[in-house]
Amino acid sequence: MSISSPDTVPGQFTLVLHSHLPWLANHGRWPVGEEWLYQSWAASYLPVFAMLRRLAADGLTDQLSLGITPVLAAQLDDPHCAASMHEWLADWRLRAIEAAVATDPNRRDLGRREFLAAGAAIDDFETHWRHGGGPQIRALAESRVVEILGGPLAHPFAPLLDQRLRRFSLEQGLADAHARWAVDPQGIWAPECAFAPGMETEYAAAGVGHFMVDGPTLRGDTALGRPVGDTDVVAFGRDLVVSYRVWSPKSGYPGHGAYRDFHTYDHLTGLKPARVTGRSVPSEDKKPYDPDLVDAVIDRHVDDFVDQVRRRLISESDRQGRPALVVAAFDTELFGHWWHEGPVWLERVLRRLPEAGVAIGTLAGARRDGFVGAPVDLPASSWGSGKDWRVWNGPQVEHLVQLNAEVVDTALTTVDKVLSPGGGRNRVADQIVRETLMTVASDWPFMVSKDTAAGYAVDRAHKHAHATREICDAALRGRPERAQTLADNWFRADNLFAGLDARRLRTDAAAGTAATGGRT
């Protein structure tokens, strides 16, 4: 599809990427576990960050708003994960060699392609990532090519979480961004874009200026950010007309027959040999992937997307009588991990939009430049199925909702009893809070509701619940040495958020006294 006109159009386009995986280190390898991290790192984080470095080197700024959850950032900085990632990349190259010497010509072609790709990934990793993700993210922030969005520590479904723990998780998540990257995020990606009325006041107290919701939360009127309630905190809505062009529950560019198929594996090597071919074609009948067929298709999809953005900006600006904002938002892992060609498409889109007369900016820039309308009261909502809470609070996950409520109640009761007023750091209380946050991660009910590795998800939730309960039990029974031993052992198992301090889990009365909460 050709671009309708190179003339400048009113308004601004903003791309938002949400980067997140639950804590996976030392919790299984294949088919679910650390492999998920390394696949996403190799297929998405390496190429997307390389693309952003190129844009920064060309002097481009404010290209997108990039959310990175603290729990993912911790994995990208973790020495075990970095060493294991290097080994995984080497294994990828070995698997490619195995395919390259096969007798089947299609498998040989696959092996040669993957050998080159693995080698390039190893070079990239050794050059840029051997000291973790922190230096990469800090450099992108300092170059101003992106706005960094923060978020709560371990990605909880916040509306269902005890208010005390919810505030703590957000405040300490923002503090984590400052500690890792010397960045104080102005905005956040709320996990699952989940919202409950009243959360805007917690955002304001934590120093958050803007956050993302899904389009239906703003009743589809996403052409401007909207202050929420009586606060100055702005909600930006995902434009589904544009976002669904790329990826929706039923369609999107990645489903084109020429693109590499995500679900089909060569079972001898674990490599992906096939193209989509057709939506109803079984894996065994899919045609071999052919890179020569892809480039023109990417360009067509770039042109289509740019045309859609232009049309949407023009129509929304005309409708409201002022320049409009169009926000498209996706999981970062879509680009590369799920959609092999996605990083190439993404870079071409960001370079093509200004050529087509479209201004690009971040959420922070949109707020600064006045793409903000009248205040609004938001309903309970999320970006999940039905745009409500059913994925995380429906009948299929009622057992996890109950588990979470019981664990949180036990944890908070115990922490309040073991912390001495004015006392020093308490490692037992710290670990109780860590394990509780891991228990209530939104990933587990999502995986159950969507039936994607549901058994793994239930096991993870109960494992962290068990850790919480046994530490609490020892502490409440007056067995401090046993509680300390358990806390130390569980901490070594994950080595996560070493700076977490349960003393910052303040009472409700104290929690609202400071505008920036626990940011240190």
Image (cartoon, rainbow, N blue to C red):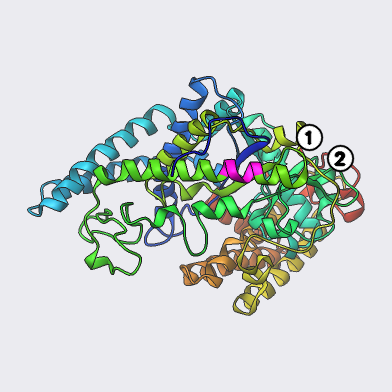
From the viewer's perspective, is the residue at label 1 or at label 2 nearer? 1
Mark 2, secondary structure of its residue: loop
| Identity of the residue furthest to the front in this view | 4
The C terminus sits in image quarter: top right
Q: In the rendered image, which quarter is residue 461 located in? A: bottom right
Check disc 1 and give the amino acid type.
Gly
Which residue corresponds to mark 1?
Answer: 370
Q: Is residue 190 above or below residue 54?
A: below
- Specify the segment rendered in magenta: 309-314
Question: Which residue is labeled 2 in the image?
Answer: 515
Position of residue 125 measured from the top left corner of the image (x, y, whole percent) = 39, 33
Q: Residue at x 40, y 48 (%)?
A: 38
Disc 1 and disc 2: Cα gap in Å?
24 Å
Pointer 2: residues within 10 angstroms few (<14), some, or many (20+)? some
The magenta stretch spans residue 205: no
Position in image of residue 399 (x %, y %): 63, 77
Magenta segment main secondary structure: helix
Q: Is residue 493 visible?
A: no
Q: Amino acid at mark 2?
A: Ala
Q: Nearer the viewer, residue 345 or 445?
A: 345
Residue at 33% x, 45% y: name it: 88
Which numbered disc flags the more N-terminal residue, 1 or 2? 1
The image quadrant that residue 384 belongs to is bottom right
Q: Residue furthest left?
A: 103
Look at the numbered disc 1 and give the secondary structure of its residue.
loop
Which residue is rendered at x = 68% and y = 49% of the image?
A: 152
Q: Nearer the viewer, residue 513 or 8?
A: 8
